[in-house]
Amino acid sequence: AQSVTQLGSHVSVSEGALVLLRCNYSSSVPPYLFWYVQYPNQGLQLLLKYTSAATLVKGINGFEAEFKKSETSFHLTKPSAHMSDAAEYFCAVSDQGNDMRFGAGTRLTVKP
Amino acid sequence: NAGVTQTPKFRILKIGQSMTLQCTQDMNHNYMYWYRQDPGMGLKLIYYSVGAGITDKGEVPNGYNVSRSTTEDFPLRLELAAPSQTSVYFCGARQGGDTIYFGEGSWLTVV
């Protein structure tokens, strides 16, 4: 079955600094990849998705991610962090089939 | 458009009790899912369904049961509640390879 590994359970950046959240996947077939964000006591909201079109995917709130097959990676970036970006972020993979598996999550803290 | 609706939002159960978490979607999506979320563990797939009458086990199905009699509804049943089932439960619906649209979650405590 497919799986994802998110490197770093906690990431802390200063406001205005680059945000980089790492995700590596494992899949036996070309995957669909997703990033979700979760604010405290809320459900999950889709940030962006890769479904075999352009490898650089732009999402909401200024986030983007690049699919790199050779590195089996789908890292999430944002050029300049904002205080409102503080949340937990989840990477997820689907093998174009039925189920979707999530990583353990990365909690992003933004310091003023 | 309500999307995915989960009830109840909060529930406290005693060990050994049973209950059903309800999930309803109005998007006519074929796929539905139940996940549980524990601190530091991300979301773990409990069960999923690719259409009415079809269900499959996910990563952590033990202690749970599901049914899918209609496209809209996908209830999750806990037969003999255990403290290990204290968690936040999320139901979701999906069409094809698109994203999963999640409900707001159900907070369950077993004491």
Image (spheres, coloured by chain):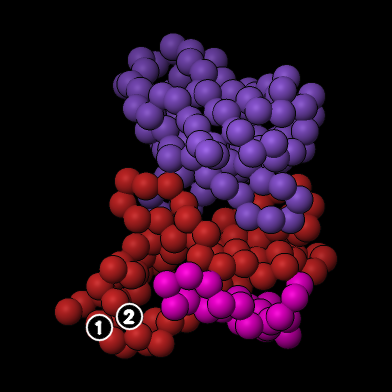
Q: Which residues are magenta?
A: A52-75
On the image, the x and y values in percent for residue A56 come to 63, 83
Compute the Cα span from label 1 to label 2: 7 Å
> Which quadrant holds residue A82?
bottom left
Residue sitting farthest toward the top: B17
- State the residue position of label 1: A14
Amino acid at the residue labelled 2: Ala
Label the red chain with its letter.
Answer: A
Position of residue B73 in the picture relative to residue B69 (left or right): left
Please report the residue visible at 25 percent of the width from the left and 83 percent of the height from the top: A14
Residue A22 in sight in this render: no
Amino acid at the residue labelled 1: Ser
Label the purple chain with its letter.
Answer: B
Please state which of the two labelled residues, at mark 1 or mark 2, is closer to the viewer. Answer: 2
Q: Are marks 1 and 2 in contact (CB under 8 Å)?
A: yes
- State the residue position of label 2: A81
Circle number at residue B20: none
Please report the residue visible at 53 percent of the width from the left and 39 percent of the height from the top: B1
